[in-house]
Amino acid sequence: MSKVFKFHNDVDTDQIIASQYLLLPTIDDMKGYAFESLDGDFAKNVAEGDIVVAGENFGCGSSREQAPSVLKALGVKAVVAKSFARIFYRNSINIGLPVIVCREMYDVAEAGDEVNLDLAAGTIETSKGTLTCTKLPPYMQGILDAGGLIASLNKEED
Amino acid sequence: MGNTLIEKIIMKNTQKANVAPGEIVTVNVDRVMIHDIFIPFVADKFKEMGFTKLWDSDKVVLIYDHLVPTSAVEDVRHFQIGDAFAKEHNLKNFHKADGICHQLMTECGYAKPGDIVFGTDSHTTTYGCVGCFSSGIGYTEMASILGTGQMWIRVPETIKVRIDGKLPENVTSKDVILRLIGDLGADGATYKVLEFSGSAIDEMSVASRMTMSNMAIEAGAKAGLFAPDEKTCEYSKVKMEDVAWLKADEDASYVREMTYKAEDFVLVCACPSQVDKIEAVSNLKDIKIDQVFIGSCTNGRLEDLKAAAEILKGKKVAPFVKLIVTPASRSIYLEAVKAGYITDLVEAGAMVTQPGCGLCCGRACGILTDGERVVATNNRNFLGRMGTSKVEIFLASPKTAAASAIAGKIVEA
């Protein structure tokens, strides 16, 4: 089961990881500051396999790949939103963080809910019923399945 | 069925007879830009991918701007890694203190009409001002281009924005793009291209167009494109006959068309803390301010400094207001010195800083704290962007910013 951490519309990359932390040398050094301005305890409370749920335009703003990277490093299983900003979406797939478009989830899920996200089937079981997620185009699904762009490039070479 | 401007650029690049929105294609990248914040991560990923050689060192541009000059000891590490990367790969296109990356990319001719360019910064959309398809990407993807010279893209839909007529006095391209973002919403153009046209657009300088391409990303856009004209050719040092193909067909297909009368635009601000929260300056009454910032890749060009200098000449900044001016590049700074704009600004009370990203990216040169309010000419008013998350940022044109600095509150120029 995954616990839901819920955020609003237009969450920008400065809110996911603020610019002053980008100078820290590694993602592991940065991850403790994820969502600091919105939920100071997020990094402490999130556990492996939990999911982030948000409204429209999640990840808008800067091109910083550290935004999806800190979420992945904290064990976030997927981000489920009504819609995603372009660069965040590409970056997430490239680093192997599942980004899932499911318009109903934001309205159905509350913070702290326990849900069951089946990535392969593209479904989310909630206490209020099972939701179906929008499928990724096959090209992007291929990169994600390989575990991200680096793994995918290595696979092409093999 | 004809093609939009972005489709024409992709067709030329891929040598395909036609492309349609939604299609995934692999493009040959004409140029890439990496800046100082992300170079350590790009260098790491490049190694992790097993690459040892750049696909084409002449096509790679490394620019230091976010941390110039350094304001914390940790910043130096980024320069050390960047310097080593530049040396190892014999990078000639390397700028350590010449200005903001997005200004230099067109100013130095790295991004030309018809090119496809990617950069590790979301405001890479700026080069659309000369009819270049340019967009921001992350560092993993950048490392992959450095090794292969290629990237996959989804052919985007296009929103046509047509503005005819003459803009009212003191209304600038900044007021235009802010209004458009307000109408579109912060995600209204996500995955799409904004294609600008009309007689009001034709009248604009390349610098004014640059402000609009720069902020196209604030509506989520993948690019903000202008077809090249004589002004573009002079600026980018290309011949009109070589770029004449860079225009949309009459029967091109658009996902949406937005048509405006230039005369209807007014002076506006983006209010805290959303870029699409647009309000007419005339409706903002008695909003007292602590600081004004004129600069950035959005509005730090010569015409912006000129507009501010003309308003501030012979006047004084309100005693409780700090006015910070940051030219977008060294060459703009020099031009502004020669033209006397810097003298006018400094005599009025401005602090002029080294070209760079400092304040706009919340790192240096005027960071604010809880309860403070700033009128700024840059592109983002997100929570925490220029200091703590309780700073109120109002985005406006250089004219509105200059007039507000004198009044000590938000006023029309």
Image: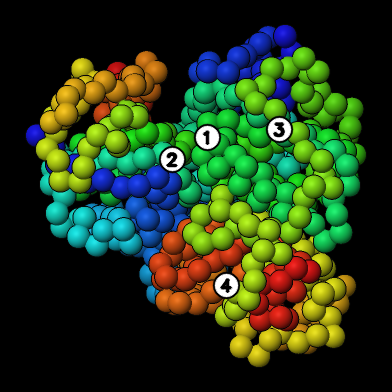
Say whether mark 4 and mark 3 are on the same chain.
Answer: yes
Residue at screen point 37% across, 55% down = A15
Q: In the image, which is nearer the foreground, mark 1 or mark 3?
A: 3
Mark 3, residue position = B258
Mark 1, residue position = B190
Instruction: Give the letter of the chain under mark 2.
Output: A
| Mark closest to the chain's N terminus, 3 or 4 | 3
Residue at screen point 61% across, 88% down = B320
In the rendered image of this protein, does residue A130 appear above or below residue B32?
Answer: above
- Cα–Cα span, label 1 and label 3: 16 Å
Residue A133: percent from left, percent from top: 29, 23
Say whether mark 4 and mark 1 are on the same chain.
Answer: yes
| Type of the residue with mark 2 | Asn
- Number of the label disc, if any, that sits on residue B374: 4
* Quadrant of the rendered image containing residue B365: bottom right
Instruction: Say if residue B98 shows up in the picture.
Output: no
Q: Quadrant of the N terminus of chain A?
A: top left
- Cα–Cα span, label 3 and label 4: 31 Å
| Type of the residue with mark 1 | Thr
Residues at circles 1 and 3 in contact by the CB criterion of under 8 Å: no
| Type of the residue with mark 3 | Met
- Number of the label disc, if any, that sits on residue B41: none
Left or right, residue B53 beside residue B256: left
* Quadrant of the rendered image containing residue A65: top left
Instruction: Give the letter of the chain under mark 4.
Output: B
Give the SS element for disc 4. strand
Left or right, residue A13 beside residue B326: left
Q: Nearer the viewer, residue B406 or B105?
A: B406
Left or right, residue B289 beside residue A75: right
Residues at circles 2 and 1 in contact by the CB criterion of under 8 Å: yes
Residue B230: percent from left, percent from top: 90, 39
